[in-house]
Image (cartoon, rainbow, N blue to C red):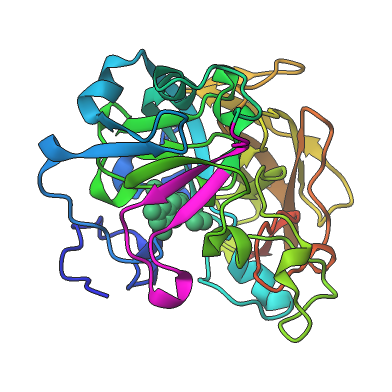
Amino acid sequence: SDYSGEPPRHPSLRINAKEPFNAEPARRDLVASYITPVDLFFKRNHGPIPVLDDIRSYYVTIGGLAGGPRRLSLDDIRRLPKYNVTATLQCAGNRRTEMSKSRRVRGVGWDVCALGNATWGGAKLSDALQLVGVPYHTEITPSGGKHVEFVSVDQCPEEKGGPYKASIPLGQATNPAADILLAYEMNGEVLKRDHGYPLRAIVPGVIGARSVKWLDRIDIIEEESQGFFMQKDYKMFPPSVDWDNIVWSTRKPQMDYPVQSAICSLEDMSAVKPGQVTVAGYALSGGGRGIERVDISPDGGKSWLEAHRYQKKGVQYVAGNVTSDKWAWVLFKAIVDVNSDTEIVAKAVDSSANVQPESVESIWNLRGILNTCWHRIRLLATP
Ligand code: MTE
Ligand code: MO
């Protein structure tokens, strides 16, 4: 693979793999703003960043239609109604390093910052499909199409099957309320090369792996995508399955992500002066389920207090039973008293009352995805 055309990156990013480029921001940087700046947004790649020189000749091909394929230029897509959707994109591998400490897993190691919250600008996929003759709320086309496959122009290594691909059900793709975008902007700017320039899919509430960057084709197909990252990766296996007994076909590709939270104001095993300590971080859930509550324990899970949550720019706290914006994270904050060495814990509850699991062992899986266990920070009180 050729990595000579990679774009410049922010020097403060923590690099987890260089080629392909995988990096995340520092914990404190991540929660410094409600909307994650593009420079600090995590970057998750499986191959080189494609070099697309002439954008005037760029188009995305929509295949699997009754009347043959249609090409949509960027102008065609910009002429559709524009939506700005604030959605958190989270890699299924977020917090993998921590899972690997319990029992080794395979994959790029990530701390707790393989996610970011951005305002994505673009056309709705449902509108683009309607434009080419697939109406809203279509579950199956007359010719039997049931899935929408996104195909990228990027070239993943040969063993990963060439261009990056993923699919979602047609019913979701043609549902305007699912807010799936063909995005050409991120935080009000033209999408950067690292994040899919000139056009990417954004599938809110679903693991980042399905939000395909650098779109080449959108195909309506009968079966779900046979791409490597749908069939041989990003599946959640039980703790009993390891590399010697895995049968990939026994599990479905992961779609929605579960409820998650992490503390970002503190590093594990750090020393603090006895007294008040700020516990701040993020919480989010998948499938459009908002965050109902974030619980913080100052003593390893014996007692709990509820954190303040906020969702908009600045500090607009949402109290009690106000439901949160369904595709976007909430940031939280609590002040706890620390007088001796202790363990601070965070766990979130979503709008369906799903709670993060207590132990990492109970959700261990060989690929190290979806580590959503209680987030623990050990603190050493040093006067
Ligand atoms: N799309 C393409 N074409 N190639 C990729 O490697 N990585 C996926 C997804 N889309 C990927 C892709 C994964 S696993 C994630 S988590 C997100 O993009 C990351 O998006 P970001 O780099 O914009 O943060
Ligand atoms: Mo990912």
Q: Quadrant of residue 2?
A: bottom left
The reply to whether residue 24 is in sight is: no
Residue 249 at x, y percent in the picture: 73, 66
Q: Is residue 126 visible?
A: yes
Which is nearer the eye, 367 or 312?
Answer: 367
- Vertical arrangement, residue 90 with respect to residue 130, above or below: below
Q: Horizontal and vertical percent for residue 259? A: 72, 42
Q: Position of residue 241 (x, y in %)?
A: 80, 75
Task: Point out the image quarter for the N terminus.
Answer: bottom left
Looking at the rendering, the stretch of residues picked out in magenta corresponds to 143-167
Q: Quadrant of the C terminus?
A: bottom right
Question: Closest to the observer: 236 or 295?
Answer: 236
Q: Nearer the viewer, residue 315 or 327?
A: 327
Residue located farthest toward the right when viewing the structure as drawn: 302
Left or right of residue 303, residue 320 in this image = left
Quadrant of the image occupied by residue 190: top left
List the single residue furthest toward the top.
Answer: 81
